[in-house]
Amino acid sequence: MNEKDICEKKCCGCTACMCVCPCSAISMKEDEKGFLYPRVDNSLCIDCGLCKKTCSQKNEYSTAETSFIAKHKDEKIYLNSQSGGAFTALSDIILQSGGTVYGASLDGNFEPVHTRAACTEERDAMRGSKYVQSRMEDIYIKVGEDVKDKKVLFSGTPCQVGGLLKYLKVKGIDRKNLYTVDIICHGVPSVRLWRDLMAYYEKKEKSRIERVVFRDKTGGVARPCHYFFVKKKRISDELHRKLFYSNLALRESCFSCDYAQMGRISDFTIGDAWGVEDKNPEFYDKRGVSLLIFHTEKARILKHQIEDAMWMESIDIENYKQGNMQHPSSPHRNVEEFWKDYHSKPFPFIIEKYARNNIFLNIRYILRRIRGAVK
């Protein structure tokens, strides 16, 4: 089996093909941009076709049944959450039943990786935004084992949830104990960019980074900003945020994402309730409000338990639709130039050209358009 034959569409790096392989012939390797893709060891491959079958599975989509804006009632939990604390409220229900929770945590190198939590202390490491694609490794296999005899909550980007559902379906594993949460996703940027940025700050500060905060609630969450901590010094980072929202360094599959739509494959969708100050000003809090969407009957059964933990107000989802709930992100017009420079120029050049001085790119684009019009 050739790895290019596995995917019918552009690979999102979910690892379902690797996890379903019965002979461990597939591994995930980083490409030159820092994104993980499947690689096949043909000396181990038996051409069973399970990888391709798993990747080509079609997930079932559900429309929004009921939608809410929400804030956690526990002030400490609320302050330690990036928006309104919906993930904590949902995962507490599962943990209190003796179940397990799966979500993205930061490893020792401050890179996101999906982990398993069986207690609140382990779960708390999953709270907070991570603006880098998380490594899945063998998480689907672990979920498949847990879900046989206990409740499991799996949280991730829509494509990560989709990969899990495909894996479980092909393996014939019953999903009655599984609860899935997808995060409204703008797209996943390169981990290589993230590593290079951390190295850039460490060289500048002449010290190792000690802590990373992707979003800080100081002054509210309307303008998310990243922070690095070096020798107890807090460094505000606008560079990664600008590159993230520019769409220059997103994974290629993000530009044709099937999951960026109102129909969802999960039980719950959570995200920030952007615009709540105008649409529901009585509920507004500058420290963040969650958007919490129920898609399935299984999700609605938990509604009263969630209400015990959160202040909730019913909304019309049409008033809170975000761009990536309707269509995928679009590539920046200079994305090819960005990666060409990335592989041939020093990192400080990339920062100056693409994160600090985007007007340079705009002038180049306008000149190209003018030359094209003249011709």
Image (tube, rainbow, N blue to C red):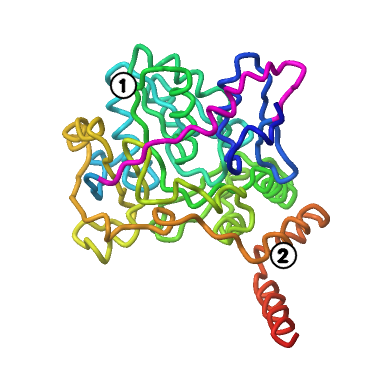
How many marks are shown on the rendered structure? 2
**Cα–Cα span, label 1 and label 2:** 51 Å
- The type of residue carrying mark 2 is Glu
Residue 46: within the magenta? yes
Describe the element under mark 1 as helix, strand or loop: loop
Is residue 253 positioned above or below 136 on the image? below
Seen from the viewer's position, the closer of residues 371 and 57 is 57
- The type of residue carrying mark 1 is Lys
Q: Nearer the viewer, mark 1 or mark 2?
A: 1
Q: Residue at x 31, y 46 (%)?
A: 84
Q: Earlier in the sequence, mark 1 or mark 2?
A: 1
Q: Residue at x 58, y 33 (%)?
A: 135
Give neighbour class at mark 1: few <14, some 14-19, many 20+ (Cα, 10 Å).
few
Task: Provide the residue designation for mark 2.
Answer: 352
Task: Provide the residue designation for mark 1.
Answer: 176
Give the residues in magenta: 39-64
What quarter of the picture does the C terminus occupy? bottom right
Seen from the viewer's position, the closer of residues 362 and 236 is 362
- Going by the picture, which residue comes out furthest to the bottom? 374
Residue 104: within the magenta? no
Query: Is residue 6 shown left or right of residue 226?
Result: right
- Going by the picture, which residue comes out furthest to the right? 344
Describe the element under mark 2 as helix, strand or loop: helix
The secondary structure that dominates the magenta segment is loop
Is residue 351 positioned above or below 39 on the image? below
Seen from the viewer's position, the closer of residues 294 and 276 is 294
Q: Residue at x 27, y 63 (%)?
A: 277
